Image (cartoon, rainbow, N blue to C red):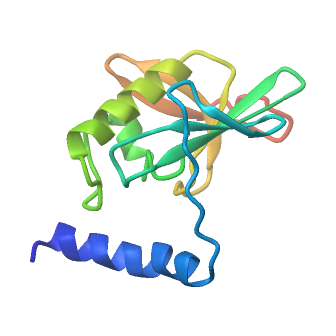
Amino acid sequence: MSSGTSARQQMFQDSVHPVREADLFELVDVADVGTDIAPGVRLLRSPGHTPGQVTVELSSQGERALISGDSIHHPVQMGHPELCSCVDIAPELAAKTRHRMLDSLAGTSTLLLGSHFPPPTAGRVRREGNAYRLAPTAPGGATVRG
């Protein structure tokens, strides 16, 4: 068994099976254009990591944020979106999803919330050549210079 396979099995054992065993496991069909699940909360398909992986788009009062979920595991993947996690089910698709997501966010005012990022976990995506970086934001939304 490869280390990717055992890591995937461990991930399911730690994160998926307990949810299913607690009877909290509910599948949601997400349309190609996304699916609204509450006012200001939309699920967007982000394939490649695990089956059914989504990102969560939040919008309110003209502001927008995107919770990356497992699409981006570490900020280093912003500089190298082609780098994959050992638990990505479809690595090429996961990389394509990251590229697409980062490209759509680059230069916009949308706040990216990195689910697995160490502080700073939130910022705006900036393009740097063929890569991206997270420009951290201060409380209130101002970009932190540095």
Task: Name the residue rendered at 21%, 38% in the picture.
Answer: 92
Toward the viewer: 94 or 79?
94
Residue 56 at what x, y percent from top left? 63, 42
Could you tell me if residue 109 is visible in this image?
Answer: yes
| Residue furthest right in the image | 61
Toward the viewer: 56 or 76?
56
| Residue furthest left in the image | 1
Above/below status of 83 relative to 57: below
Residue 63 at what x, y percent from top left? 80, 25
Task: Name the residue rendered at 67%, 26% in the picture.
Answer: 110
Could you tell me if residue 67 is visible in this image?
Answer: no
Above/below status of 41 relative to 103: below
Toward the viewer: 13 or 87?
13
Residue 140 at what x, y percent from top left? 86, 35
Above/below status of 138 relative to 128: below
Quarter that holds the N terminus: bottom left
Residue 24 relative to residue 102: left or right: right
Toward the viewer: 35 or 77?
35
Quarter that holds the C terminus: top right
Residue 49 at what x, y percent from top left? 35, 51
Task: Name the residue rendered at 19%, 67% in the picture.
Answer: 4
Residue 120 relative to residue 84: left or right: right
Query: Quadrant of residue 135 in the image?
Result: top right
Task: Name the residue rendered at 29%, 54% in the picture.
Answer: 88
Give the total number of marks visible in the rendering: 0
